[in-house]
Amino acid sequence: MTDDTPLLTLQNQLAQMQAQIDALQKDKAVWQEDKVEMQTRIDHLLAELKLSKSQKYGRKSEKSPRGTFNEAEQHKTTEPPKHHKKGKQSLAEHFEREEVEHTLTELACSCCGEQMHHCSSEDSEQVKIIPAKISVIKHKQFKYACRHCEHEALTNKIITAPKPAQPIPGSIASPEALAAVVTAKYCDALPLYRLVDIFERGGLRISRGTLANWCIKAGNLIKPLVKAMQAHLLGEHSLCADETRVQVLDEGENPSSNSQMWVYRSNEVSKQPVVIYDYQAGRSRACAEEFLMDYQGYLQCDGYSVYDGIEGITPVACWAHARRKYDEALKAESKNKGRAHKAISFISQLYKLETQAKNKKLSPQARYQLRQEKTLPILTQFKVWLDEASDKVIAGSYIGKAIKYNLNQWHKLIRYVEDGHLGIDNNITERDIRPFTTGRKNWLFSKSVNGAQASATLYSIVMTCRANDINPYYYFQHLFKTLPARQSDDDDFTDLMPWNVQLDFDYS
């Protein structure tokens, strides 16, 4: 009988070795997966670091990059280049002028010694600026009494001539002074403490608390007019919206919480544009619903979800936001930039058509026709490319996120081709919110809710003035002279709207 023990032992050893090999291969596969996952993570962190450096130290421009796939560059413009005007600038005629004459003290001719006579003059002009020119308005109200009543009646009534209603009764602030303060703070982004220093150099000592109180009361005075502007805005065909944070110290128990300044404005082709700032304690859908309660129509905004689902509102997305995602991918990722270049090329073609429409000053109907004929085919090609590219990119990469954002927002991104009144992006609102963010860098926060609400009201006037090419100082001055005489908040403010108002001085 044959002894099988050595054979069984060898088979067991082979089985054990095979099990060890299988375990090692399994460990290798897991290690390979971990290696790929770790490398993907490292690449993502490096991309984040590169993007962070680019945002901090790189240029902020989002111009289309030069590249193989930038097809829009192949279309040469036929418009002549715009050159800067050369020569000395002529000064406006409305400036007050004083003449300074320069004459010779010795009129003897250097050649023959005879007396020279005046034949002509050589004229040149310089600008004279007097900073913080402060003056005082002295109101002298005459009193009147009846001499007959003085002798015959038991009482004698003295009547004082009234003075015009003042923006802040009992205050030293004139309409001109209030206009100067609010224009400096809300138009020129000057913090009140700097205004205190400026006025003190002019000889006027006034506290920052007093100036802050003036701003709050000025905002309360103008609030009825801004409500009328809001009603006009909500009656327009389409709107744009954006929001940014603002810190209010006296709000609730947590002064570090960030409230929001919402901005709503008319579309870019509106003939009577209005810009309204709306201060809210949060960033929820209820804030937008409260403002847009009486509005039905298009609302152009970024991809923020609170604007979706509001009754009567049709959201329109912003192509500038979509393009920004690909720009971030270009800055962040060192490899595989071809897809980002290709996407930006498609978007550049869309913007080129919009630039042509703007340069030709096309009507909304003509712009609609242009988009139907030339924009829609580009969008169709872009959508096909996006669908194909989405399956080939890493979901967590910057290019993957950009493509996903594009696809998720697609139905709102293409909506602008439905109506010629709509813009391709929401940049017009971002430009209107920029003065607020610039001012916020200087004054950092609002002390109280009343101050934040007053800021919203006064910024509304400043930005509506800019949209209508009106000098805000003279408009504020007119309002502070006119509004105190209005008896009720329900008055008709049609005559004070920026497109109707008649200003004594409009040096825009």
Image: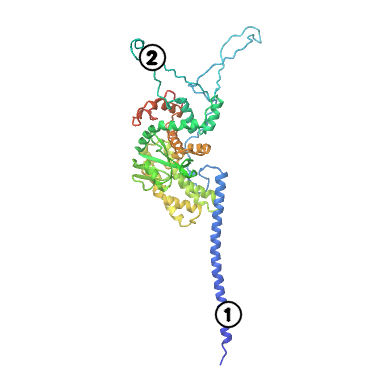
Residue 413 position in % (x across, y down):
41, 47
Q: Secondary structure at mark 2?
A: strand
Q: Is residue 435 above or below residue 113?
A: below
Residue picked out by circle 1: 13
Residue 226 position in % (x across, y down):
39, 34
Between 437 and 382, the one nearer to me in the picture: 437
Work out which residue is located at the far bottom of the displayed protein and give it: 1
Q: Amino acid at mark 1?
A: Gln
Q: Secondary structure at mark 1?
A: helix
Q: Amino acid at mark 2?
A: Tyr
Residue 272 position in % (x across, y down):
38, 33
Camera-side mark, 2 or 1: 2
Classify the position of the N terminus by image quarter.
Answer: bottom right
Name the residue located 49 percent from the left edge and 23 percent from the top edge: 92
Residue picked out by circle 2: 144
Mark 1 burial class by Cα count in 10 Å: few <14, some 14-19, many 20+: few
